[in-house]
Amino acid sequence: MTEPGAYSDVEYVFEPHSNAMPDLREYLDALWERRKFMVELARADLRSLRTTTSLGSLWGVLDPLFQAGIYFFLYIILRGSSGKQTEFLPVLIGGIFLFGLSMAALGEGGGSIRRSKNLMLNSTFPRALLPVTSVYKSLRKFVPSACVFAVLFPLVGGKLGVGLFVLPLLFALQTVMSVGIALLASTFVVLVPDANNVMTYVSRILFFATPVIYPVALLPDGAGLLVGWQPLFPLFASYQAIFSGGVPNLGLVIQTALWAIALLAIGGRVFLRHEREFTIHL
Amino acid sequence: MREPAVSEALVLPSEHPTAPEPSSIEVDDVSASYRVRIDSKDIVADVRRLFSRAESSDRLIPALRGVSFTVARGSVLAVIGRNGAGKSTLCRVISGVLPPETGRVVVRGRLNLLTPGLGFSEALTGRENITLGGLAGGLSPARLSELTEEIGEFAQLEEYLDLPMRSYSSGMRMRLASAVAVFLDPEILLIDEALTGGDAAFSQHIAEKTAQLTGEGRTIVLVTHGLSSVRTMATEALWLHQGRVAELGDPDEVVSKYMRYCRIESLGLDDQ
């Protein structure tokens, strides 16, 4: 606390926006200093979710379960029922739970700046805090889903092998990727008014271009070229290998890591170059 | 109605002009605008703008034009003017929320912005919102736990602290926001029309706290429509008109000119 009459050495200089990158180290320090604020903000949003519906956070678990049920039903109908098809059920459930995390980065992360207009117009803080908070919030929402999945997985016939040891690495890479996606999407949503419509199609395309509701092995020759170009493909192909009791291909894991780094670097750069002009657009 | 004379690039007289102490706020030839999108059909240009410095075709609405002034340490500057004059924009530019289009702002000291639109959460209780607001303002969790009861008491909301914010009236929300802001230990406090949000008793309460902060040498910028507050609290007054400095100087003189301009005297609408 400052003594009466005494002033700290803090000096701020505000000049016209120039698209220049801020000092990255100072920026990250400022973000780290606000980590408690981030936790409280995420908690406030989660509390709001619980108080606006009767089932509250239970929806976070029910939603992927319902989705898995629907897609499994469609899968059985399209492929014909046989004992072999049910082997895919644990892979499908795991994929849908985890895919929800990446879609939250795109949807909630993308809308994080626009949704916080009041906070943006009335407080100063590193703006990246908002998309990062949305990713942190989706991770917290994911915890009960992960617990349910851990119990459900063996019950629906899931088997795990040594590939399980790669799971934490893949999850960490998915989190890094989610931060990159959230930074990029939130900038896009603030600066481009039609972005929300585009996001709907992007998430739909990603859903069908990612091996979540179908096994990678089912892709016909050449189809890999069509869907393998996007960042979520190697990640979810690796998840499938783990949930099928195998070990993910090293090439796929390296591709996932490269995508995660690239998305964080591109998302961070685009966001930091534009964040000072966000308030002009809100 | 006669337009007020517009004077630009004025510098407030400091109470101690020879003192070497630096000023708290320097606003130098600042202009600021809001970008408004009107029926944009060129999404290709919007996407291209993400990756380049190319300008978009958005319409710029000027909010401040060539505003210059200096605020001495320990003084209270009242900013008055009609709705849309640029008062809130000025607060946002000084606090760094909105980048100036031209010019430069220098702020020396830790600054807090108190505004009716402070981002409090409806779902959280008053107590939790104090935590959220305090952390947003940079208070440590340990300091916050010491201050929470005191803030609740200052806001006169002790009995309501554990109720969700959605059950609060707008006046109660404003009292909580004001209380958090004044307890953030600001060296410079920007108050944007906050005094008009509470009842008379609370306005008096916060005026006393503001006087205490000023007594401790803090600098205050007060944006208000309450002209009596300007006369009793301010050491200097700034009248903004259509984004420009119309008058700057002694509060009584500036308020008198402003009232004459608005013809408030003849209509008997003064807030006294």
Image (tube, helix red, strand yellow):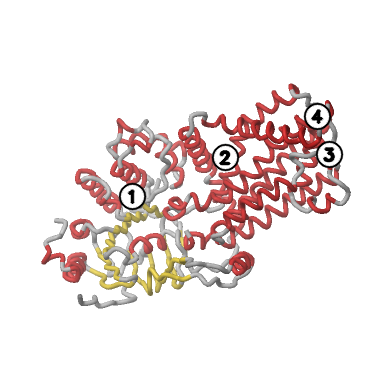
Measured in 3D between alpha carbons, the distance from the residue under mark 3 to the one under mark 1, in whole angstroms, is: 63 Å
Pointers 3 and 1 within a single chain? yes
Give me the residue at 35% from left, 60% from top.
Answer: B88
Locate residue A161, reporting x and y percent: 83, 29
Query: In the shown orientation, is residue A236 left or right of residue B89?
Result: right
Considering the numbered disc 2 on the image, is that residue within a helix, a strand or a loop? helix
Mark 2 to mark 3 CA distance (whole Å): 28 Å
Q: Chain of mark 4?
A: A
Q: Chain of mark 1?
A: A
Mark 1 or 4, closer to the camera? 4
Give the quadrant of residue A68.
top right
Q: Quadrant of the N terminus of chain B?
A: bottom left
Type of amino acid under label 3: Pro
Q: Residue furthest right?
A: A221
Which residue matches tag 4? A81
In-front residue for pair A126/B52: B52
Find out whether the residues at labels 1 and 4 contact each other: C-beta distance under 8 Å.
no
Residue beneath label 1, please?
A4
Which quadrant holds residue B123? Answer: top left
Mark 4 belongs to which amino acid? Ser
> What chain is tagged by disc 2?
A
Q: Where, by quadrant of the figure, is residue A162 drawn?
A: top right
Sequence-first tag of 2 and 3: 2
Q: Amino acid at mark 1?
A: Pro
Mark 2 packing: few (<14 Cα in 10 Å), some, or many (20+)? many
Q: Which residue is labeled 2 in the image?
A: A137
As rendered, which of B96 and A48 lies closer to the eye?
A48
- Name the spot of residue B265 as percent of width and height, x first: 12, 65
Label 1: which secondary element: loop
Counting residues from the start of the chain, the first of labels 1 and 4 encountered is 1
Separation (CA) of disc 4 from disc 3: 27 Å
The residue tagged 3 is: A248
